[in-house]
Structure formats: C-alpha cells, structure tokens
Image: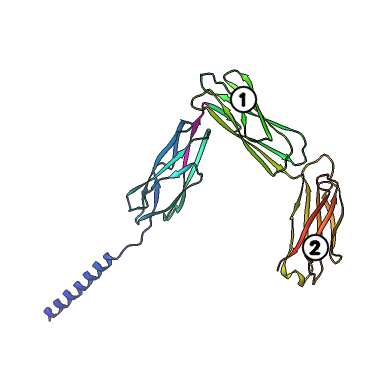
Amino acid sequence: MNARFSFLNLVLTGLAAATVGAASDQPTNGAAEIAFATPLYDFGTVNIGTMVKHDYVFTNTGNATLVLTDVHPYCGCTVAGNWTKEVAPGQTGVIPIQFDTTGRAGTIDKMVKVTSNSKTQPSLDLKLHGQIWRPIDINPQYAVFNLSSDVTTNATMTVDVTNNTDVPVTIAPPEVNITNFTAEIQTNIPGKDYKLIVHVSPPYNYPRLQGQITLRTSNTNMPAIPVVAMAIIQQAVTVSPPQIMIPANAANNFYVTTISIMQNSGANPLVLLEPSINDTNVQVKLTEPQPGKQFTAELLFPKGFVAAPDLQFTVKTSHPQFPVITVPVKALK
C-alpha cells in the first residue's frame, strides 16, 4: 500500500515539475523603452560652412527588443546616417546626424523625429542647437517686397552688411540678374559696415518676381554673397471663387452661392455697378460688408435650374485695371 502511494507521489511530482518547466519556457510579455544619453546636442559656435556631426546614443531600458522604424529630420540641411535598427534589452544603439551650416547664420535650432516601438515614447524629438558665425553678416537674409499690382512707383528697402572680422573688407558694385530690380552699396564705415540698397520697379505683371543680387567681397572665406530679391505681387482686386461650380444635385432644390470681391489696396473706395447674370431665372443680390472695400454677391438658382454653357456673372467696377469682373458659372455632371 505504502509502495503504491510512493509510486503515485513520484508520478505526480514528475508531472508538476514538467508543468513548471514548460511554463518557464514560455516567452514573457514585455515592452521596449528608449532613453537617450543626450537628446539635446549643443555644438557651440562654428564657422559658416562647417559640417556638424553628432552621434545620439540611446539605450533600450525595457525588457523587449527595441525597434526604430524611422528617423526623420525636419529640415533638408540635416540628414540621418545609418542608425541602429534593433536593440536588445539593456543594449545601446546610435543615430548619427549631420547638419550642413552652409548659407545659415546666427542661432540654430534643428529637430529630428525618432519613431520606435517604445511603450512610453513611441515618438520623440532630438534637438540640435548652436551658433553659426559668418565673417560677413547680411540682415535680413532676403530682400522681400509685398506690393499691389496697381502700384506705379518704385519701392526700396535696405539690407545691412556687417564685417565681423578685424580685416577691412571691400565690396564691389552689386550684380543683379533680374530687370525689375536694381541695387547699390552705401558705405557707413569703410571696410566694416555697409548698406545694400535694393529697388524694385513696375510693371508688376506676375504674382511673384524673384532674382538674385550677388555681392563680390575681398574676404577669402566669403568672396561672393548671394542675396535673394523677391517681390510678391497681390492683385489690387481679388475675386473668390474665380469660378462657380453648381453641384449635380442642386436642381432638386433652390441653390444659393456667394462671390466675394475684395479691394486689397487703392486710395479710392471701390464702387461696383450693375451686378448681373445672363439668365433671368437667377436672382442676384449685392451687399457691402465693408463699404468701398469688400463686397458679396449672392446668387439664387431656382429649383430645376439648368445652366447654359456660356453662363456667367458680371459686375462693373470703378477700378481702372478691372473695369468688368467676370465669374463663369458651370454645372457639375
């Protein structure tokens, strides 16, 4: 009897041990975690044109494999090298980053987005900070004009040119590659401080005019300084939308739409006269939310309306550049 029970105990003990062993062989659920030694890298002060390089070191502080799915710099001047894709628990990886300082100056802040399977930080930003020193500073970096198409006179702005070195610098007359712009150099302190005077002149026939002004200097590190010149031309009178599209199901009911007409500049108030549409079945109502500046034309299409191919809204204006405003009306099929 005792022997029989002893044998049964041995069998049960063996089964229990096998069960425990099998359970210990099963994978445990875990989570990956990412921690950076220095998520912010301050590269200090460097000369313009320097290639800043840094390796961001990170550790998997979790208990499952860390997988980096993406490393994405927010700026094209910053690139990521071949980073560590997978890191076991307790191990480290590297994300090499390279930043090109060419054409940049002053205080710099760049960010790189890192995406991984980290449980608490699936997405985070690495930061790059520092100062870029230029032998010759240009402020502002661009000569930008915001103009109206009805302006008939020249516009002028100035750009400061400062020599930051101890060696005097000379600057040759500016070179300009677009006919609407002219430029000249004015000396404030010989060899040290200058002003670039930029002029833009009409006609302003395009939404944007853009060219480059080149300053030739005696500084060997910056022998040529490019300055972008740009004129953004805004129409004196704008219409929105430029075309009316009637939905295909609009014929099932009355359909109402509006046209906004805005005068963006001009010494005299804008006057609109004789708003109409070349279909007597359509009602037109013109209002002035801002007298002499902003107008709204409301169009009411009757139930069952069918648009003719040449349907259009027209209104006369007091502006010499826009004697008549025309908005085509089309039906979607």
- Number of on-image labels: 2
Which residue is most to the left?
3
In-front residue for pair 221/284? 221
Q: Amino acid at mark 1?
A: Pro
Q: Is residue 5 above or below residue 220?
A: below
Image location (x, y in percent) of residue 119: 42, 56
Magenta stretch: give its range: 125-135
> What's the residue at 21%, 69% (across, down)?
17
- Residue carrying label 2: 311
Which residue occupies the extreme right position in the image? 274
Nearer-N-terminus badge (2/1):
1
Residue for badge 1: 173
How would you classify the magenta stretch by its main secondary structure? strand
- Crowding around mark 1 (Cα neighbors within 10 Å: few <14, some 14 to 19, many 20+) is some
Q: CA distance from mark 2 to mark 1?
A: 56 Å
- 133 over 304 or under it: above or below: above
SS under mark 1:
loop
* Few, some or many residues within 10 Å of mark 2 (<14, 14–19, 20+): some
Q: Is residue 13 magenta?
A: no
Measured as percent of width and height from the top left, residue 177 is found at 62, 34
Q: In front: 169, or 115?
A: 169
Residue type at mark 2 is Leu
Position of 35 with respect to 276 (left or right) is left
Please identify the residue farthest to the bottom as the structure is shown.
1
Residue nearest the viewer, comparing 305 with 262: 305
* Location of residue 43 in the rendering, given as x and y in whole percent from the top left corner: 44, 34
Work out which quarter of the rendered image holds the N terminus and state it.
bottom left
Q: Quadrant of the C terminus?
A: bottom right
